[in-house]
Every structure is written in C-alpha cells, then in structure tokens.
C-alpha cells in the first residue's frame, strides 16, 4: 500500500481530524483554517522544516515564500496565536529573515 516510509508518515498526518496537519518532505504544514488565529485574508498555509529551521508561508494569491534560520519559537507563536496571523507575519517575519519565493506547499 505504501511505497516509502514518507508515504506512511504523510498518510498518518494528512486528512485526520486529530492532527489537522500534513507532513511533506519533512515540512510540517498547517492550513490557517485549522489554527486558532483569526481568519486570514492573505495567508493560506504555513509550514516549518524543523531540521533546517526554515519557515514557509503560502499566500492565497498563490505565492509561497521560505525564510531561513527561523526559530522554532516563531513557528510556535504562529500556530498558537489567537490574533491576526497576517499582523504577526508583517511584524516578525517579512524583512527580518533571508529567503525567497518557492513552489507552493499544498
């Protein structure tokens, strides 16, 4: 049924009501609608590569950006905030980390 260990992990994380996250190529991905934050007008999903400390932000416009050397504490703030994730992005991420546009996460 599964062709690789990654397929097993992906199957276990995607589409379940308990985790509400996906794991693709070592990146934990969370859709904004599954987070406690206010609905976002611009951000569709966020992702974090724990091994390499890379944060991913996917916008509803279709662009996805990755940010290098993003601390785990920033990821934890993003997934736990009950406020505006867009405001958190603009105040703490945009312009503060090196990075660039990449292929979409989801």
Image (tube, rainbow, N blue to C red):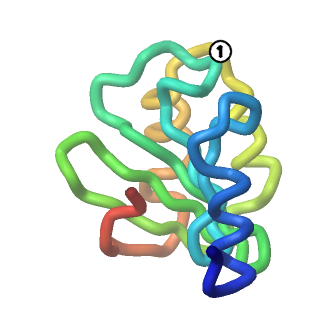
Q: Position of residue 29 (x, y in %)?
A: 58, 53
Which residue is pictured at 44% across the width and 58% down the height? 95
Give the mark count. 1
Decide: is 63 above or below 5.
Answer: above
Q: Which residue is mark 1?
A: 82
> Is 52 displayed left or right of 54 in the figure?
right
Q: Position of residue 79 (x, y in %)?
A: 68, 35
Quadrant showing the N terminus: bottom right
Quadrant showing the C terminus: bottom left
**Front residue of this view, candidates 74 and 97:** 74
Residue 78 seen: no
**Front residue of this view, candidates 101 and 103:** 103
> Is 41 displayed left or right of 17 in the figure?
left
Residue 47 figure quarter: bottom right
Residue 43 figure quarter: top left
Residue 90 seen: yes
Q: Position of residue 19 (x, y in %)?
A: 73, 38
Helix, strand or loop under label 1: loop
Which residue is pictured at 37% across the width and 51% down the height? 58
**Front residue of this view, candidates 14 and 41:** 14
Q: Position of residue 35 (x, y in %)?
A: 61, 26
Decide: is 53 above or below 45.
Answer: below
């Amino acid at each position: 049924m599964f062709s690789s260990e990654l397929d097993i992990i992906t199957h276990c994380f995607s589409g379940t009501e308990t985790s509400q996250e996906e794991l693709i190529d070592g990146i934990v991905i969370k859709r904004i609608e599954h987070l406690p934050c206010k609905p976002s007008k611009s951000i569709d999903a966020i992702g974090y590569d724990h091994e390499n400390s890379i944060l991913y932000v996917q916008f509803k416009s279709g662009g996805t950006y990755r940010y290098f050397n993003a601390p785990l504490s920033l990821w934890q703030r993003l997934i736990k905030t009950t406020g505006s994730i867009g405001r958190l992005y603009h105040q703490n991420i945009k312009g503060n980390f090196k990075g660039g546009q990449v292929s979409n996460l989801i």
